[in-house]
Image (spheres, grey):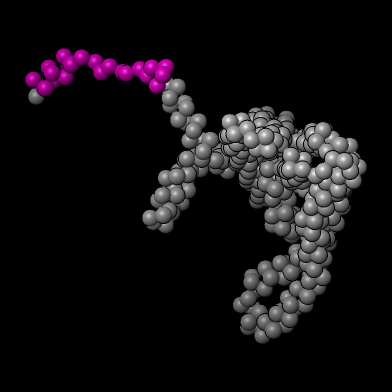
Amino acid sequence: HTRFRTHMCTRSPVRVRHRSPLHKAASAAAALCIRLLFLWVTPAVRRGWRVPLSQDDASACAGWATRSTEALLAWYDEQDASLSYRRRLWLLVRWRLVGSGVMYAIFVASQLAQPLLLQRIVRAVAAHEQGEGMWLAVLVGLNGVVGSLAKEQQLFATFCLGAELRSLSVALVYRTALSLRAASAPPSTANLLSNDAQKLLDALPLIHLLWACPLMILVAALLLVDLAGVAALAGIGLLLTMIPLNLLLVRRLKAARAAHLPHSDARVARCLELVKGVRALKFHGWDAAFEADLLARRERELPYIRTELGLFARLMTMTIALPQLATALALAAAVLTSPSSPLTADLAFPVLSLFSVVRFPIMFFGELVG
């Protein structure tokens, strides 16, 4: 024992190995690659292939995505009490929202560059310039990869922000509702939460369209004039009619859902009443009367559901049909106004690519505003 103590006292201190700058740079690059390619999901996918996943497996990935509701509530309570609810939410998301905006700007630039690269490739193939065509094909592939990575990072960041805002908002409402008496709480709290808090998650992935959609329309119109002439703007004009029509249908759909909600609340309240008093209901033999009442309430809901489905069908029909008509109109206008210029591949393919780039932001812009 004495020899062991002497040996421990005379041992040299443990040397702490400091990492070199090269090692730190390699670690930072590896972490960036893991986050950029979503490689942090791979261990959970491999484990899920072998055995059923558990809550602990999901918790291991949660650190890369969103914070827990308890952490969000703690952060909310740490803020200055004089700040409003909207101001605190802005402080929660502002820098991550700016970062996702940068990613979306990279995606927009890659999408707008695609028609120009496609036109260069068609001309190089027509001129039998194999070397230039090969490099342009490689550039098109890299442009697509960079745009896809930026788009997925933007979607992931905004989905995480929307999930955090929804989780925090629901937790705050429930915390306030629990501090009130049952008679003071509105009867449709659950339905209001499910409809209103969900809008935060629905709107955040599309939030950057508020600035990107007008920018893409302007740049696409300039490119279209350069490619096919001023007459081709007729296709952009037809495509722009999607915005007010989409906005009108979304608002009518919102009004239909608002009219449907009181009937849905009444039916849900009746079901809760049935469940809470099921013993007395069975004892008195009122189950058949309650079932008939619930079915009658459901029948009164069906016209509102049909209206909502009809409006949604019109919205989908317009979304699919109008972009095709706009592309055909732009090509027809370009050919009819310049009969001496035939419709060649270096005109048709860039125009088709340009309309495919512009139509998706226009499709969702009216829904976002609505």
The one of 201 and 360 positioned closer to us in this rendering: 360
Whether residue 269 appears in this view of the structure is yes
Direction from residue 7 to residue 322 in the image, left or right: right
Q: Can residue 234 be found in the magenta stretch?
A: no
Direction from residue 298 to residue 338 in the image, left or right: right
The answer to which quarter of the image holds residue 206 is top right
The one of 284 and 313 positioned closer to us in this rendering: 313
Q: Position of residue 123 (x, y in %)?
A: 70, 35
The one of 327 and 70 positioned closer to us in this rendering: 327
| Residue displayed at 83% across by 38% down | 228
Whether residue 176 appears in this view of the structure is no
Q: Position of residue 340 (x, y in %)?
A: 87, 41
The answer to which quarter of the image holds residue 214 is top right
Q: Can residue 9 be found in the magenta stretch?
A: yes
Looking at the rendering, the stretch of residues picked out in magenta corresponds to 3-23
The one of 254 and 47 positioned closer to us in this rendering: 47
Q: Position of residue 33 (x, y in %)?
A: 49, 33
